[in-house]
Amino acid sequence: MNIQTFVLGELQTNCYLAFDQETKQGIIIDPADEANFIGEQILKLSIDLQAIIATHGHFDHILAAWELTLAFNLPLLIHPKDLPIINYMQKSASFWLKRKIIEKPPENIKEITPKNKITFGSQELEVIHTPGHSPGSICLHSKKNRALFTGDLLFANGVGRTDFPYGSDKNLSASLKKLNKFPADTKIYPGHGPASTLGKALFQLS
């Protein structure tokens, strides 16, 4: 699996383009911002886009979703428990960024849960429900590549904030425990900041 990382938007959010090298089928994880740029990269690499996925519903992870769902005729895949957050995307973005937001919330949405598998080419990602930072936060795990997209659950040097009204320290701790089943050398790709390994990231918390 080839993984391209784009750091986008005012909050420096990681957007990932992951694709199968042989078939060029791929996915976008967390379309953070700059839809034109993301679209250009997809076309430049001749990717056959199969899915657009959000690890959670916070605005800095989905600002480009509306345009990309239209451009590629694909829904945004997101856990149903984060759907209410999407409805407040523009208000949240305006509050935190202190400017008028012209980007719209995506309208073409499909719910995703741990019952689903994300497949593209010979690649497969397991969906793991990991609430805490938000009720519908998910991680995506590739057993084949020992790769884990952690969203804002786990960073190289910390964890996501839980001081939102819907955040939960208890749920976040339980979600982190779910990751213990994976090998320590699993590479993590977080929502912000540099990549790391699962072992190093969890050690930082001990």
Image (spheres, rainbow, N blue to C red):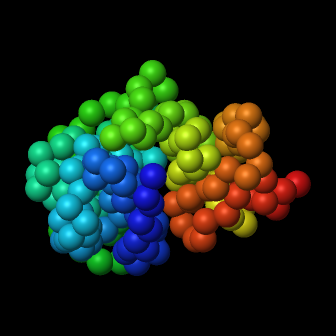
Residue at left offset 78%, top offset 53%: 199
Q: Is residue 53 above or below residue 175?
A: below
Q: Residue at x 27, y 33 (%)?
A: 110
Residue 64, placed above or below residue 50: below
Q: Residue at x 18, y 65 (%)?
A: 43
Q: Position of residue 119 (x, y in %)?
A: 37, 36
Instruction: Decide if residue 195 is on the left or right side of residue 197.
Output: left
Q: Is residue 152 above or below residue 183?
A: below
Residue sticking out furthest to the right: 206
Farthest top residue? 115
**Quarter in which the C terminus is drawn:** bottom right
Q: Is residue 141 visible?
A: no
Q: Name the residue nearer the viewer: 10 or 165.
A: 10
Residue 129, x across and y down, in percent = 54, 33
Q: Is residue 43 left or right of residue 199?
A: left
Q: In the rendered view, does 140 fall on the left or right side of 167? A: left
**Number of residue marks:** 0
Residue 171 drawn above or below residue 55: above
Residue 8 appears in the rendering: yes
Residue 98 x/y as whole percent: 36, 77
Across and down, in percent, residue 133 comes to 58, 48
The residue lying toward the viewer, choosing from 42 and 63, is 42
Q: Residue at x 55, y 41 (%)?
A: 144
